[in-house]
Amino acid sequence: MTEVSVHPALWPAPLATGAVEATVTVPGSKSVTNRALVLASLAAEPGWLRRPLRSRDSLLMAQALRALGVGIEETVSSSSSSPAPGAEGVPDGEGEAWRVIPAGLHGPATVDVGNAGTVMRFLPPVAALAERPVRFDGDPRSYERPLNGVIDALRVLGARIDDDGRGALPMTVHGSGALDGGSVEIDASSSSQFVSALLLSAPRFNQGVEVRHIGGRLPSMPHIRMTVDMLRAVGAQVDEPETGGEPDVWRVSPSAILGRDIVIEPDLSNAQPFLAAALITGGRVTIPDWPQRTTQPGDALRRIFTEMGGACELTETGLTFTGTGRIHGIDVDLGEVGELTPGIAAVAALADSPSTLRGVAHLRLHETDRLAALTKEINGLGGDVTETEDGLHIRPRPLHSGVFHTYDDHRMATAGAVIGLAVAGVEIENVATTAKTLPDFPRMWTTMLGAES
Ligand SMILES: O=C(O)C1=C[C@@H](OP(=O)(O)O)[C@@H](O)[C@H](O)C1
Ligand SMILES: C=C(OP(=O)(O)O)C(=O)O
C-alpha cells in the first residue's frame, strides 16, 4: 500500500580504521512506543509518552490511531511548554513528547500497517472496539506475514472480520463499538505478537480475555512480559504464567485503563549495531540511559556479546561496552530474543570460531525470511553460512567486498553495516529501510565512526 522505492541506492558501508570510541544516544523503543500508544488510546483519560520513537513503525501506529479518532499531539518538551502533571525524571528540553487524547473509536477508516508487525497485530482488536468498518492494508510483505492467530481469535471473541480466507491481510474489521471477549485458544508459535495483541485491548472487552496458547514453542517471551508489565502499569489486572498462573495461559480482567505519563526506554535492539562496533574494533561504546531493569530483549546483548568476546559495565548513566578486537563464535538459542539474530549473525561471520544460532525458525516470517536472507548475503561476501531447521550455522571465512541486499529489512541493513566495519567495499542496498525503526541510522553510524581513535 505504501510506496516502496524501486531502485534504492547503494550506501558504501564505512570501514573502521581504528577502535571505535563513542557515546551513542539511541532513540526510543519501537515495542514500548507502540504498546504505549495503544494503551493510551484505549485509556479513560489523556496520557503522555516522553521520548517516543519517531520512525516508520511508530508513525504508522500513530496515524492509524488518529484515523480511528484518537488525538495524538506532538510537542517538544521545553521550559516554555507545560509539562504534564507527574512527569518525573525528564529534564526540560529533552526531546519530544506525545500527548494522547482518547476518544470514541470509530471508522470508516483505512489502516496502513506498512510492514509493522506491531501495527498489523495490535490494531485489529482495537478496531473491533470501534464503530463501523476499519480496513487493514500494507506493504506486499504484510500480506505474507501470519495474522491468523489474531483474526481467528477475534472471531471467537465476537468480532466480524472479512478477509480473503488466508488469515492474512488485507482485511476489514467490522466493529460494533464493543467486543464480548472471553476465552480463546490460539497457536502463537509463529509470533508472540498474537498474544500481546489480544492482551493489550482486553481490559476494554466486556468479559476481558483468557488466552491459551496451544501450539509449539512460543517465541519472544520478553515481549509478552513487556505487554503484561505495561498493562499492569496502567491499572489492568493480569494473571500470567510467570507470576504463578497456569503455563501458557494469560487472563486480563475488564477494567478502565489509566492515562499515564511514561518515559520510553531507548531501543536496546537498535543499540545492537553500535555495541557490535565496539566488539569488532576493540573499542568502547556507551549507550546512555540503558535501563537497570527492562523487558526488552536487547538487554540480552550484555550476556551474548560478552560471551562473544567483550565486556560491559552497567552504571547509573548507561551501558559501556568494551571490545578486545577478538570475537568468538557462540552456540546460542535466540528463541526469546529473535530480533537480535541478524546482528549476532553479522558478528559471528567475523569471529575466530564457528557459531550456531538456534530457536529462530519463526524468523522466516519476519520482515523478510531472515534465515534465507542472512545466508545469501553473508555467503555473497564469501562467507560460509548454512540454514538449519531452526537457525543458522556460521563458519567464519575471510570476506570480500560486494553488495549486501536488505530485502526491505531494517535489521539486514544494520547487519550489513556491522560487517562493513571490518570488510572493505561492502555496499548496503536500500539503507533507507532502517527508517522502519531507526530513521537516522546512516548519520548516527558515521558520527560514531568520526569519533574513532
Ligand atoms: O511485540 C513486539 O514488540 C515484538 C515481538 C517480536 O515478534 P515475534 O514474536 O513475531 O518474533 C519481535 O520479533 C518484534 O520485533 C517485536
Ligand atoms: C520482527 C521485527 O519487527 P515487527 O514488529 O515488524 O515484527 C523486528 O523489528 O525485528
Image (tube, rainbow, N blue to C red):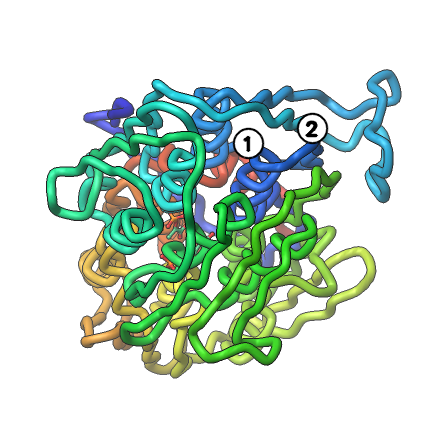
Secondary structure under the numbered disc 1 in the rendered image: loop
- Image spot of residue 232 (x, y percent): 66, 57
In which quadrant of the rendered view does residue 361 lie? bottom left
- Image spot of residue 380 (x, y percent): 19, 57
Q: Quadrant of the N terminus?
A: top left
Residue 392 appears in the rendering: yes
In which quadrant of the rendered view does residue 357 lie? bottom left
- Image spot of residue 312 (x, y percent): 67, 70
In which quadrant of the rendered view does residue 79 lie? top right
Identify the disc placed on residue 224. none
- The reply to whether callout 1 and callout 2 are in contact (CB within 8 Å) is yes
Against 245, residue 83 (above or below) is: above
Q: Residue at x 66, y 54 (%)?
A: 21
Question: Where is mark 2, residue-wise?
Answer: 96
Residue 435 appears in the rendering: no
Type of amino acid at the residue the image marks with label 1: Arg
